[in-house]
Image: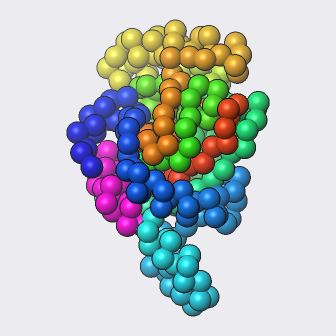
Amino acid sequence: MNVNFLDTLKNDGIVKIPQFLNEVELSKIQKIVKQYSAVKGAHKSYFSTNYYQLILKILKFDFKRFFQDITLLNLAKKKKLNYISDKIFNKRSYLKFIDGYFTPISNKDLLPWHTDQAYHGDEKNYDEFVNPDHAHIKFFIYLTPVGPNNGCTSYIPKSHKIGYAIRKGIYEKVLEYSPYFTLTEFRNFISKPINLKYINNYLKDSNAVNNFLKNTEKLEQGNNLVSEFDFAMNSGDAIIFDEGGVHKGSKSLINDRLVLRYLYSSKK
């Protein structure tokens, strides 16, 4: 796989890869994931990521699952997922999980606008905050078609840079913590003058926050709004994105959604 898209991924926080899987790969992966996919987070939807987990499959005489897990690990190697993650983090990365999950047709958003690496809660002890350099990259491989209001993962480009600046400021005790998980919380946090000044100085870009606020103003007005941040992709296409950016999982109005995910972390 050509990896010339790395600059786009670093700059925007997301990149789209058409035909990530060829027809043979797509058919093979669909058959595997369909057998074990469940709602997001279900135990059976996770696949082996290391030798220990593979050995457990052998000890349980679950040879079918063993070879299927090997197939998914070999796919990651073939597509150079570890190499891509290493380049994004500028250091060695680690495979945290592989899972496949199923989203049925529904008129409810899978996940509203949010940032995965936000700190939660109204009160926090600074000792509990995670180092902002402990980041995650996700590879979403769509095994069914997706589009606006039909299962796509919408993403606001460059928002990962603002998210990193927030985490860094809080972690280093320069910024006072307040919740910023949801889009509304995120916008409120970066709109505070003291936070705005720090983020602009850190990014060396006085337009970054202003552009984000302008681009997201209408997104708070309704969940059914189709925006420029939505996209359409075919079965076998993929996206790679930085979890620290602001994104959402839309409702699936047209067809069920089946996804294979790989998550890589900068920390073992």
Nearest the viewer among 111 and 183 is 111
Write down the region rendered in magenta: 73-91
Tell me which secondary structure the magenta stretch mostly adopts.
helix
Position of 121 with respect to 230 (left or right) is: right
> How far from the left and from the top, in percent, is residue 69?
49, 71
Residue at position x 32%, y 45% in the image: 88
Specify the quadrant that holds the C terminus: bottom left
Nearest the viewer among 177 and 189 is 189
> How far from the left and from the top, in percent, is residue 99?
56, 58
Position of 3 with respect to 62 (left or right) is: left
Scheme by which the image is coloured: rainbow
> How far from the left and from the top, in percent, is residue 157?
43, 25
Q: Does the image show residue 163? A: no
Residue at position x 25%, y 44% in the image: 3
Q: Is residue 193 above or below residue 161?
A: above
Residue at position x 71%, y 52% in the image: 39
The picture quadrant where one finds residue 82 is bottom left
The picture quadrant where one finds residue 266 is bottom left
Q: Is residue 22 above or below residue 171?
A: below
Q: Does the image show residue 184? A: yes
Instruction: Reply yes or no: does residue 124 show up in magenta.
Output: no
Q: Is residue 78 above or below residue 167?
A: below
Label count reads 0
The picture quadrant where one finds residue 95 is bottom left
Residue at position x 60%, y 48% in the image: 258
Position of 110 with respect to 119 (left or right) is: right
Q: Is residue 85 above or below residue 196?
A: below
Instruction: Reply yes or no: does residue 82 show up in magenta.
Output: yes
> How far from the left and from the top, in percent, is residue 139?
45, 47
Nearest the viewer among 195 and 7 is 7
